[in-house]
Amino acid sequence: MSIAKKLVGQTAAYGLSSIIGRTLNFLLFPLYLGIFAPEDYGVINGLYAYVGFFNILFAFGLETAFFRYANQPGADRQQLFNRVLSFIIFSSVLLTACILLFIDPISRAIKFPDQQLFISWLAIILAVDAIVNIPFARLRLENKAAKFAGIKMLNVLITVAANVFIYWFCYNVYQENFLVGLKPLISKIYFPEWKLGYIFLINLVANLLLIPLLWREFRSFKFSLDFAFMKPLLQYGYPIMLMGFAGIVNELLDRILLLELLPPGFYPDLTSKGALGVYGGCYKIATFMTLAIQAFRYAGEPFFFSQAKERNSAQTFALVTKWFVIVCAFIFLFISANLDDLKFLLRRPSYYQGMSVIPVLLLANLFLGVYYNLSTWFKLTDKTYYGTFISFGGAAITIILNIVLIPVLGYMGCAYATLACYFSMAAACYYFGQKHYPIPYPVATMAGYLALAIGLVYIAQHFVIEDFVWRHLFHLGLCGLYLIVLYIIEKPTFAVSR
Protein backbone atom coordinates (compact mmCIF):
# COMPACT_ATOMS: atom_id res chain seq x y z
CA MET A 1 0.00 0.00 0.00
CA SER A 2 1.46 3.38 -1.01
CA ILE A 3 1.93 6.15 1.54
CA ALA A 4 -0.78 8.19 -0.18
CA LYS A 5 -3.31 5.37 -0.02
CA LYS A 6 -2.43 4.68 3.58
CA LEU A 7 -2.89 8.36 4.49
CA VAL A 8 -6.21 8.61 2.67
CA GLY A 9 -7.45 5.38 4.26
CA GLN A 10 -6.57 6.52 7.76
CA THR A 11 -8.06 9.95 7.17
CA ALA A 12 -11.27 8.33 5.98
CA ALA A 13 -11.41 6.15 9.09
CA TYR A 14 -10.85 9.03 11.49
CA GLY A 15 -13.15 11.32 9.53
CA LEU A 16 -15.96 8.82 9.10
CA SER A 17 -16.06 7.98 12.79
CA SER A 18 -16.14 11.64 13.75
CA ILE A 19 -18.76 12.67 11.21
CA ILE A 20 -21.04 9.70 11.90
CA GLY A 21 -20.63 10.30 15.63
CA ARG A 22 -21.59 13.96 15.33
CA THR A 23 -24.52 13.07 13.08
CA LEU A 24 -25.87 10.49 15.54
CA ASN A 25 -25.47 12.93 18.40
CA PHE A 26 -27.32 15.53 16.33
CA LEU A 27 -30.23 13.12 15.97
CA LEU A 28 -30.60 13.17 19.78
CA PHE A 29 -31.27 16.88 19.67
CA PRO A 30 -34.98 16.69 18.63
CA LEU A 31 -35.44 13.98 21.27
CA TYR A 32 -34.15 16.31 23.98
CA LEU A 33 -36.20 19.29 22.84
CA GLY A 34 -39.38 17.19 22.95
CA ILE A 35 -38.79 16.68 26.69
CA PHE A 36 -36.79 19.68 27.93
CA ALA A 37 -38.17 23.18 28.30
CA PRO A 38 -35.76 25.99 27.29
CA GLU A 39 -34.81 26.47 30.96
CA ASP A 40 -33.67 22.83 31.23
CA TYR A 41 -31.88 22.85 27.88
CA GLY A 42 -30.14 26.05 28.99
CA VAL A 43 -28.65 24.16 31.96
CA ILE A 44 -27.27 21.49 29.62
CA ASN A 45 -25.79 24.07 27.22
CA GLY A 46 -24.37 26.17 30.01
CA LEU A 47 -22.63 23.32 31.83
CA TYR A 48 -21.20 21.81 28.66
CA ALA A 49 -19.87 25.24 27.66
CA TYR A 50 -17.73 25.18 30.81
CA VAL A 51 -16.72 21.59 30.02
CA GLY A 52 -15.23 22.84 26.73
CA PHE A 53 -12.91 25.20 28.62
CA PHE A 54 -11.90 22.65 31.24
CA ASN A 55 -11.18 20.01 28.58
CA ILE A 56 -8.39 22.25 27.30
CA LEU A 57 -7.04 22.78 30.82
CA PHE A 58 -7.05 19.07 31.68
CA ALA A 59 -5.20 18.19 28.45
CA PHE A 60 -2.31 20.68 28.86
CA GLY A 61 -1.62 20.44 25.12
CA LEU A 62 0.20 17.16 25.82
CA GLU A 63 -1.45 15.16 23.05
CA THR A 64 0.39 17.21 20.42
CA ALA A 65 3.55 17.20 22.55
CA PHE A 66 3.32 13.39 22.72
CA PHE A 67 3.29 13.19 18.90
CA ARG A 68 6.15 15.67 18.62
CA TYR A 69 8.50 13.91 21.05
CA ALA A 70 7.51 10.38 20.00
CA ASN A 71 8.81 11.11 16.50
CA GLN A 72 12.22 12.37 17.60
CA PRO A 73 15.21 10.15 16.68
CA GLY A 74 15.88 7.54 19.34
CA ALA A 75 12.70 8.31 21.28
CA ASP A 76 11.64 5.64 23.77
CA ARG A 77 7.94 5.65 23.01
CA GLN A 78 6.97 3.36 25.88
CA GLN A 79 8.78 5.53 28.41
CA LEU A 80 7.23 8.65 26.88
CA PHE A 81 3.77 7.06 27.04
CA ASN A 82 4.29 6.06 30.69
CA ARG A 83 5.42 9.50 31.80
CA VAL A 84 2.87 11.54 29.83
CA LEU A 85 0.00 9.34 30.97
CA SER A 86 1.32 9.38 34.56
CA PHE A 87 1.36 13.18 34.55
CA ILE A 88 -2.15 13.35 33.05
CA ILE A 89 -3.48 10.91 35.67
CA PHE A 90 -1.82 12.90 38.46
CA SER A 91 -3.01 16.30 37.20
CA SER A 92 -6.53 15.08 36.33
CA VAL A 93 -7.05 13.55 39.77
CA LEU A 94 -5.73 16.74 41.37
CA LEU A 95 -7.92 19.06 39.28
CA THR A 96 -11.01 16.89 39.78
CA ALA A 97 -10.38 16.79 43.53
CA CYS A 98 -10.15 20.60 43.57
CA ILE A 99 -13.47 20.90 41.72
CA LEU A 100 -15.14 18.48 44.14
CA LEU A 101 -13.60 20.19 47.17
CA PHE A 102 -14.73 23.67 46.11
CA ILE A 103 -17.93 22.63 44.37
CA ASP A 104 -20.14 25.00 46.39
CA PRO A 105 -18.34 28.23 45.43
CA ILE A 106 -17.73 26.94 41.88
CA SER A 107 -21.42 26.13 41.30
CA ARG A 108 -22.42 29.58 42.61
CA ALA A 109 -19.76 31.34 40.55
CA ILE A 110 -20.95 29.77 37.29
CA LYS A 111 -24.63 30.45 38.15
CA PHE A 112 -25.62 26.80 38.62
CA PRO A 113 -25.94 26.56 42.43
CA ASP A 114 -28.53 23.74 42.26
CA GLN A 115 -26.55 21.48 39.91
CA GLN A 116 -23.74 20.34 42.19
CA LEU A 117 -24.31 16.62 41.55
CA PHE A 118 -24.14 17.14 37.80
CA ILE A 119 -21.01 19.28 38.14
CA SER A 120 -19.41 16.47 40.18
CA TRP A 121 -20.14 13.98 37.41
CA LEU A 122 -18.76 16.39 34.80
CA ALA A 123 -15.55 16.75 36.83
CA ILE A 124 -15.07 12.98 36.69
CA ILE A 125 -15.92 12.98 32.97
CA LEU A 126 -13.20 15.60 32.39
CA ALA A 127 -10.63 13.43 34.16
CA VAL A 128 -11.56 10.30 32.21
CA ASP A 129 -11.52 12.24 28.91
CA ALA A 130 -8.02 13.55 29.59
CA ILE A 131 -6.69 10.14 30.65
CA VAL A 132 -8.06 8.12 27.71
CA ASN A 133 -6.89 10.81 25.28
CA ILE A 134 -3.28 9.60 25.59
CA PRO A 135 -4.00 5.93 24.69
CA PHE A 136 -6.06 7.25 21.77
CA ALA A 137 -3.06 9.34 20.73
CA ARG A 138 -0.91 6.23 20.91
CA LEU A 139 -3.30 4.41 18.56
CA ARG A 140 -2.92 7.27 16.08
CA LEU A 141 0.86 7.23 16.49
CA GLU A 142 0.90 3.49 15.73
CA ASN A 143 -1.39 3.97 12.70
CA LYS A 144 -4.17 1.87 14.24
CA ALA A 145 -6.90 3.90 12.60
CA ALA A 146 -9.45 1.07 12.45
CA LYS A 147 -9.21 0.40 16.19
CA PHE A 148 -9.34 4.11 16.98
CA ALA A 149 -12.44 4.59 14.84
CA GLY A 150 -14.09 1.40 16.08
CA ILE A 151 -13.78 2.35 19.76
CA LYS A 152 -14.96 5.91 19.08
CA MET A 153 -17.97 4.64 17.15
CA LEU A 154 -18.85 2.07 19.82
CA ASN A 155 -18.74 4.83 22.43
CA VAL A 156 -21.10 6.96 20.35
CA LEU A 157 -23.49 4.05 19.75
CA ILE A 158 -23.61 3.25 23.47
CA THR A 159 -24.34 6.91 24.26
CA VAL A 160 -27.06 7.20 21.61
CA ALA A 161 -28.69 3.88 22.52
CA ALA A 162 -28.75 4.76 26.24
CA ASN A 163 -30.27 8.18 25.49
CA VAL A 164 -32.95 6.67 23.26
CA PHE A 165 -33.73 4.06 25.92
CA ILE A 166 -34.09 6.65 28.70
CA TYR A 167 -35.55 9.64 26.88
CA TRP A 168 -37.80 7.84 24.42
CA PHE A 169 -38.64 4.35 25.67
CA CYS A 170 -38.62 4.89 29.46
CA TYR A 171 -40.08 8.37 29.21
CA ASN A 172 -43.01 7.24 27.06
CA VAL A 173 -43.69 4.13 29.14
CA TYR A 174 -43.65 6.25 32.31
CA GLN A 175 -46.03 8.75 30.65
CA GLU A 176 -48.27 5.77 29.71
CA ASN A 177 -48.02 6.52 26.00
CA PHE A 178 -47.45 2.81 25.27
CA LEU A 179 -46.65 -0.51 27.00
CA VAL A 180 -48.40 0.64 30.17
CA GLY A 181 -47.86 -2.77 31.77
CA LEU A 182 -44.10 -2.10 31.93
CA LYS A 183 -44.52 1.08 33.99
CA PRO A 184 -43.93 -0.58 37.40
CA LEU A 185 -40.64 -2.02 36.12
CA ILE A 186 -39.57 1.19 34.37
CA SER A 187 -40.38 3.19 37.52
CA LYS A 188 -37.50 1.42 39.25
CA ILE A 189 -34.90 2.85 36.85
CA TYR A 190 -36.54 6.02 35.51
CA PHE A 191 -37.10 8.93 37.88
CA PRO A 192 -38.70 12.09 36.42
CA GLU A 193 -36.82 14.32 38.85
CA TRP A 194 -33.58 13.05 37.27
CA LYS A 195 -34.69 14.28 33.87
CA LEU A 196 -31.53 16.32 33.21
CA GLY A 197 -29.20 14.07 35.16
CA TYR A 198 -29.46 11.10 32.83
CA ILE A 199 -27.61 13.03 30.09
CA PHE A 200 -24.60 13.53 32.35
CA LEU A 201 -24.81 10.06 33.87
CA ILE A 202 -24.92 8.39 30.44
CA ASN A 203 -21.93 10.46 29.36
CA LEU A 204 -20.03 9.42 32.49
CA VAL A 205 -20.76 5.70 32.10
CA ALA A 206 -19.97 5.72 28.36
CA ASN A 207 -16.64 7.42 29.03
CA LEU A 208 -15.72 5.02 31.83
CA LEU A 209 -16.37 2.13 29.42
CA LEU A 210 -13.56 3.49 27.24
CA ILE A 211 -11.05 2.29 29.83
CA PRO A 212 -11.73 -1.45 29.34
CA LEU A 213 -12.02 -0.88 25.57
CA LEU A 214 -8.49 0.57 25.65
CA TRP A 215 -7.23 -2.04 28.08
CA ARG A 216 -4.56 -3.38 25.69
CA GLU A 217 -3.01 0.11 25.63
CA PHE A 218 -3.34 0.53 29.40
CA ARG A 219 -1.91 -2.93 30.09
CA SER A 220 1.61 -1.91 29.11
CA PHE A 221 1.44 1.26 31.20
CA LYS A 222 3.62 1.70 34.29
CA PHE A 223 3.12 4.72 36.50
CA SER A 224 6.25 6.87 36.28
CA LEU A 225 5.86 10.48 37.37
CA ASP A 226 8.88 12.58 36.40
CA PHE A 227 8.40 16.36 36.48
CA ALA A 228 11.89 17.08 35.12
CA PHE A 229 11.17 14.87 32.10
CA MET A 230 7.78 16.57 31.58
CA LYS A 231 9.11 20.14 31.71
CA PRO A 232 10.04 20.45 27.98
CA LEU A 233 6.80 18.70 26.96
CA LEU A 234 4.76 21.14 29.03
CA GLN A 235 6.69 24.05 27.54
CA TYR A 236 5.87 22.70 24.07
CA GLY A 237 2.22 22.09 24.95
CA TYR A 238 1.64 25.41 26.73
CA PRO A 239 1.16 27.53 23.56
CA ILE A 240 -1.09 24.83 22.11
CA MET A 241 -3.20 24.96 25.26
CA LEU A 242 -3.49 28.75 24.92
CA MET A 243 -4.50 28.38 21.28
CA GLY A 244 -7.09 25.83 22.37
CA PHE A 245 -8.48 28.28 24.91
CA ALA A 246 -8.76 30.92 22.19
CA GLY A 247 -10.63 28.48 19.96
CA ILE A 248 -13.03 27.53 22.74
CA VAL A 249 -13.65 31.22 23.51
CA ASN A 250 -14.69 31.71 19.88
CA GLU A 251 -16.90 28.62 19.95
CA LEU A 252 -18.50 28.57 23.40
CA LEU A 253 -18.01 31.79 25.37
CA ASP A 254 -21.19 33.33 23.99
CA ARG A 255 -23.24 30.79 25.98
CA ILE A 256 -21.53 31.76 29.23
CA LEU A 257 -21.76 35.51 28.55
CA LEU A 258 -25.43 35.20 27.60
CA LEU A 259 -26.12 33.84 31.09
CA GLU A 260 -24.07 36.61 32.69
CA LEU A 261 -25.02 39.64 30.63
CA LEU A 262 -28.64 39.19 29.54
CA PRO A 263 -30.67 41.85 31.38
CA PRO A 264 -33.50 40.48 33.60
CA GLY A 265 -36.79 40.46 31.73
CA PHE A 266 -35.16 40.98 28.32
CA TYR A 267 -37.36 38.17 27.04
CA PRO A 268 -40.70 38.43 28.91
CA ASP A 269 -41.32 34.67 28.89
CA LEU A 270 -37.73 33.47 29.41
CA THR A 271 -35.13 33.51 32.15
CA SER A 272 -31.47 33.82 31.16
CA LYS A 273 -31.18 30.00 31.27
CA GLY A 274 -34.31 29.74 29.13
CA ALA A 275 -32.82 32.17 26.60
CA LEU A 276 -29.65 30.08 26.56
CA GLY A 277 -31.76 26.99 25.95
CA VAL A 278 -33.52 28.64 22.99
CA TYR A 279 -30.18 29.84 21.57
CA GLY A 280 -28.52 26.47 22.08
CA GLY A 281 -31.44 24.63 20.49
CA CYS A 282 -31.46 26.85 17.40
CA TYR A 283 -27.65 26.74 17.21
CA LYS A 284 -27.93 22.98 16.72
CA ILE A 285 -29.63 23.47 13.35
CA ALA A 286 -26.62 25.49 12.21
CA THR A 287 -24.51 22.36 12.74
CA PHE A 288 -25.70 21.16 9.32
CA MET A 289 -23.06 23.55 7.97
CA THR A 290 -20.54 22.36 10.56
CA LEU A 291 -20.98 18.74 9.47
CA ALA A 292 -20.37 19.69 5.84
CA ILE A 293 -17.23 21.62 6.81
CA GLN A 294 -15.99 18.76 8.99
CA ALA A 295 -16.41 16.30 6.13
CA PHE A 296 -14.47 18.63 3.83
CA ARG A 297 -11.66 19.15 6.38
CA TYR A 298 -10.98 15.44 6.75
CA ALA A 299 -10.80 15.06 2.97
CA GLY A 300 -9.19 18.43 2.25
CA GLU A 301 -6.29 18.63 4.71
CA PRO A 302 -4.38 15.61 3.37
CA PHE A 303 -5.22 16.76 -0.16
CA PHE A 304 -3.66 20.19 0.38
CA PHE A 305 -0.47 18.72 1.83
CA SER A 306 -0.18 16.16 -0.95
CA GLN A 307 -0.63 18.85 -3.62
CA ALA A 308 1.73 21.43 -2.06
CA LYS A 309 4.77 20.47 -4.19
CA GLU A 310 2.87 20.27 -7.47
CA ARG A 311 3.59 22.99 -10.03
CA ASN A 312 0.02 24.26 -10.21
CA SER A 313 -0.78 23.77 -6.52
CA ALA A 314 -1.75 27.44 -5.95
CA GLN A 315 -4.31 27.33 -8.76
CA THR A 316 -5.63 24.02 -7.42
CA PHE A 317 -6.05 25.47 -3.92
CA ALA A 318 -7.87 28.47 -5.35
CA LEU A 319 -10.24 26.27 -7.36
CA VAL A 320 -11.01 24.01 -4.39
CA THR A 321 -11.75 27.01 -2.17
CA LYS A 322 -14.01 28.56 -4.78
CA TRP A 323 -16.13 25.42 -5.02
CA PHE A 324 -16.14 25.09 -1.26
CA VAL A 325 -17.72 28.55 -1.03
CA ILE A 326 -20.18 27.74 -3.83
CA VAL A 327 -21.41 24.56 -2.13
CA CYS A 328 -21.56 26.07 1.37
CA ALA A 329 -23.38 29.16 0.07
CA PHE A 330 -26.02 26.84 -1.39
CA ILE A 331 -26.33 24.98 1.95
CA PHE A 332 -26.75 28.36 3.67
CA LEU A 333 -29.43 29.36 1.15
CA PHE A 334 -31.33 26.07 1.21
CA ILE A 335 -31.55 25.82 5.01
CA SER A 336 -32.27 29.51 5.57
CA ALA A 337 -34.98 29.62 2.90
CA ASN A 338 -36.71 26.54 4.29
CA LEU A 339 -36.50 27.23 8.04
CA ASP A 340 -40.24 26.70 8.48
CA ASP A 341 -39.80 23.09 7.47
CA LEU A 342 -37.13 22.58 10.13
CA LYS A 343 -39.35 23.61 13.04
CA PHE A 344 -40.13 19.95 13.66
CA LEU A 345 -36.53 19.54 14.89
CA LEU A 346 -37.16 22.08 17.66
CA ARG A 347 -40.31 20.21 18.77
CA ARG A 348 -41.60 22.90 21.16
CA PRO A 349 -43.03 26.27 20.02
CA SER A 350 -41.09 27.97 22.83
CA TYR A 351 -37.92 27.43 20.77
CA TYR A 352 -39.29 28.98 17.58
CA GLN A 353 -38.67 32.56 18.74
CA GLY A 354 -34.92 32.05 18.38
CA MET A 355 -34.90 30.81 14.78
CA SER A 356 -33.73 34.18 13.47
CA VAL A 357 -30.23 33.34 14.72
CA ILE A 358 -29.94 30.32 12.41
CA PRO A 359 -29.10 32.11 9.10
CA VAL A 360 -26.55 34.29 10.91
CA LEU A 361 -24.89 31.25 12.51
CA LEU A 362 -24.92 29.34 9.22
CA LEU A 363 -23.12 32.24 7.57
CA ALA A 364 -20.69 32.46 10.50
CA ASN A 365 -19.80 28.77 10.18
CA LEU A 366 -19.38 29.21 6.43
CA PHE A 367 -16.67 31.82 7.12
CA LEU A 368 -15.09 29.46 9.65
CA GLY A 369 -14.88 26.90 6.84
CA VAL A 370 -13.30 29.52 4.59
CA TYR A 371 -10.75 30.21 7.34
CA TYR A 372 -9.87 26.50 7.49
CA ASN A 373 -9.29 26.56 3.71
CA LEU A 374 -7.19 29.69 3.80
CA SER A 375 -5.14 28.45 6.78
CA THR A 376 -3.34 26.08 4.42
CA TRP A 377 -0.65 28.70 3.87
CA PHE A 378 0.65 28.85 7.44
CA LYS A 379 0.56 25.07 7.77
CA LEU A 380 2.63 24.64 4.61
CA THR A 381 5.14 27.35 5.57
CA ASP A 382 5.52 26.26 9.23
CA LYS A 383 4.27 29.68 10.38
CA THR A 384 1.61 28.19 12.62
CA TYR A 385 2.07 31.00 15.15
CA TYR A 386 -0.04 33.09 12.79
CA GLY A 387 -2.89 30.71 13.59
CA THR A 388 -2.39 31.50 17.30
CA PHE A 389 -2.43 35.26 16.68
CA ILE A 390 -5.52 35.03 14.49
CA SER A 391 -7.33 32.82 17.02
CA PHE A 392 -6.57 35.27 19.83
CA GLY A 393 -7.76 38.14 17.67
CA GLY A 394 -10.99 36.26 17.06
CA ALA A 395 -11.34 35.63 20.78
CA ALA A 396 -10.96 39.35 21.51
CA ILE A 397 -13.67 40.17 18.97
CA THR A 398 -15.92 37.51 20.48
CA ILE A 399 -15.53 38.86 24.00
CA ILE A 400 -15.92 42.54 23.13
CA LEU A 401 -18.90 42.14 20.81
CA ASN A 402 -20.76 39.80 23.16
CA ILE A 403 -20.28 42.27 26.02
CA VAL A 404 -21.56 45.11 23.83
CA LEU A 405 -24.35 43.33 21.96
CA ILE A 406 -25.96 40.89 24.43
CA PRO A 407 -27.51 43.60 26.63
CA VAL A 408 -28.96 45.22 23.49
CA LEU A 409 -29.80 42.31 21.18
CA GLY A 410 -29.93 39.25 23.46
CA TYR A 411 -28.99 35.99 21.75
CA MET A 412 -28.99 37.75 18.37
CA GLY A 413 -25.98 39.62 19.73
CA CYS A 414 -24.25 36.25 20.29
CA ALA A 415 -24.96 35.26 16.69
CA TYR A 416 -23.66 38.55 15.24
CA ALA A 417 -20.54 38.34 17.43
CA THR A 418 -19.87 34.82 16.10
CA LEU A 419 -20.29 36.03 12.52
CA ALA A 420 -17.96 38.99 13.08
CA CYS A 421 -15.36 36.74 14.75
CA TYR A 422 -15.19 34.13 11.98
CA PHE A 423 -15.39 36.68 9.17
CA SER A 424 -12.50 38.62 10.73
CA MET A 425 -10.44 35.44 11.14
CA ALA A 426 -10.99 34.53 7.49
CA ALA A 427 -10.13 38.07 6.33
CA ALA A 428 -6.95 38.20 8.46
CA CYS A 429 -5.87 34.76 7.26
CA TYR A 430 -6.35 35.85 3.63
CA TYR A 431 -4.44 39.10 4.18
CA PHE A 432 -1.37 37.48 5.77
CA GLY A 433 -1.53 34.50 3.43
CA GLN A 434 -1.23 36.70 0.36
CA LYS A 435 1.93 38.21 1.83
CA HIS A 436 3.65 34.92 2.72
CA TYR A 437 2.15 32.31 0.34
CA PRO A 438 0.20 34.02 -2.48
CA ILE A 439 -2.67 32.01 -3.89
CA PRO A 440 -4.86 33.48 -6.69
CA TYR A 441 -8.21 33.05 -4.99
CA PRO A 442 -11.10 34.33 -7.16
CA VAL A 443 -12.30 36.64 -4.38
CA ALA A 444 -14.74 38.59 -6.55
CA THR A 445 -16.37 35.39 -7.84
CA MET A 446 -16.68 33.87 -4.37
CA ALA A 447 -18.05 37.12 -2.97
CA GLY A 448 -20.54 37.25 -5.83
CA TYR A 449 -21.94 33.78 -5.10
CA LEU A 450 -22.10 34.59 -1.41
CA ALA A 451 -23.89 37.89 -2.07
CA LEU A 452 -26.35 36.09 -4.35
CA ALA A 453 -27.12 33.53 -1.65
CA ILE A 454 -27.55 36.25 1.02
CA GLY A 455 -29.83 38.25 -1.29
CA LEU A 456 -32.01 35.22 -2.01
CA VAL A 457 -32.24 34.44 1.72
CA TYR A 458 -33.34 38.03 2.34
CA ILE A 459 -36.07 37.66 -0.30
CA ALA A 460 -37.21 34.33 1.16
CA GLN A 461 -37.53 35.79 4.66
CA HIS A 462 -39.15 39.12 3.74
CA PHE A 463 -41.65 37.98 1.15
CA VAL A 464 -44.00 35.81 3.18
CA ILE A 465 -46.42 33.54 1.34
CA GLU A 466 -49.09 31.93 3.51
CA ASP A 467 -50.15 29.17 1.15
CA PHE A 468 -48.15 26.02 1.93
CA VAL A 469 -47.68 24.84 -1.67
CA TRP A 470 -46.85 28.24 -3.16
CA ARG A 471 -44.46 29.04 -0.31
CA HIS A 472 -42.49 25.87 -0.95
CA LEU A 473 -42.47 26.41 -4.70
CA PHE A 474 -41.23 29.96 -4.13
CA HIS A 475 -38.43 28.88 -1.82
CA LEU A 476 -37.38 26.00 -4.05
CA GLY A 477 -37.48 28.42 -6.98
CA LEU A 478 -35.02 30.70 -5.19
CA CYS A 479 -32.69 27.74 -4.66
CA GLY A 480 -33.14 26.79 -8.29
CA LEU A 481 -32.29 30.34 -9.35
CA TYR A 482 -28.96 30.06 -7.53
CA LEU A 483 -28.20 26.83 -9.40
CA ILE A 484 -29.19 28.37 -12.75
CA VAL A 485 -26.88 31.34 -12.20
CA LEU A 486 -24.15 28.91 -11.14
CA TYR A 487 -24.60 26.86 -14.31
CA ILE A 488 -24.55 29.93 -16.59
CA ILE A 489 -21.37 31.32 -15.01
CA GLU A 490 -19.52 28.04 -14.64
CA LYS A 491 -20.71 26.45 -17.91
CA PRO A 492 -17.28 26.92 -19.54
CA THR A 493 -15.67 25.15 -16.59
CA PHE A 494 -18.08 22.23 -16.92
CA ALA A 495 -17.32 22.01 -20.64
CA VAL A 496 -13.56 21.95 -20.06
CA SER A 497 -13.88 19.27 -17.36
CA ARG A 498 -15.47 16.94 -19.87
Image: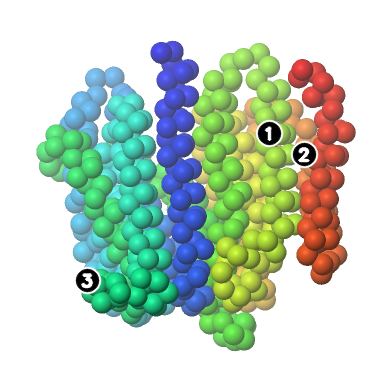
What is the three-letter code of the residue carrying label 3?
Answer: Leu
Indicate left or right for 463 with 201 as reference. Answer: right
The image's mark for residue 446 is: 2
Q: Residue at x 83, y 61 (%)?
A: 470
**For mark 1, what is the residue?**
321
In percent of width and height, residue 14 lies at 42, 35
Q: Is residue 410 above or below residue 248?
A: below
Residue at 47 percent across and 17 percent down: it is 4
> How many C-alpha atoms fall within 10 Å of the one at disc 3: few (<14), some, or many (≥20)?
few
Q: Position of residue 375 (x, y in %)?
A: 59, 36
Mark 1 vs mark 3: give the one in front: 1
Mark 1 and mark 2 residues within 8 Å of each other at the beta carbon:
yes
Going 33% across and 48% down the picture, which residue do you hit?
A: 155
Q: Quadrant of the C terminus?
A: top right
Q: What's the residue type where badge 2 is placed?
A: Met
Question: For residue 269, which quarter of the picture?
Answer: bottom right
CA–CA distance between discs 1 and 2?
9 Å
Question: Which residue does the numbered mark 3 point to in the structure image?
Answer: 101
User: What amino acid type should be assigned to the residue bearing mark 1?
Assistant: Thr
**Residue drawn at the location 82% of the way across and 69% of the way down:** 466
Instruction: Name the N-terminal-most of marks 3 and 2.
Output: 3
Looking at the image, is mark 3 or mark 2 nearer the viewer? 2
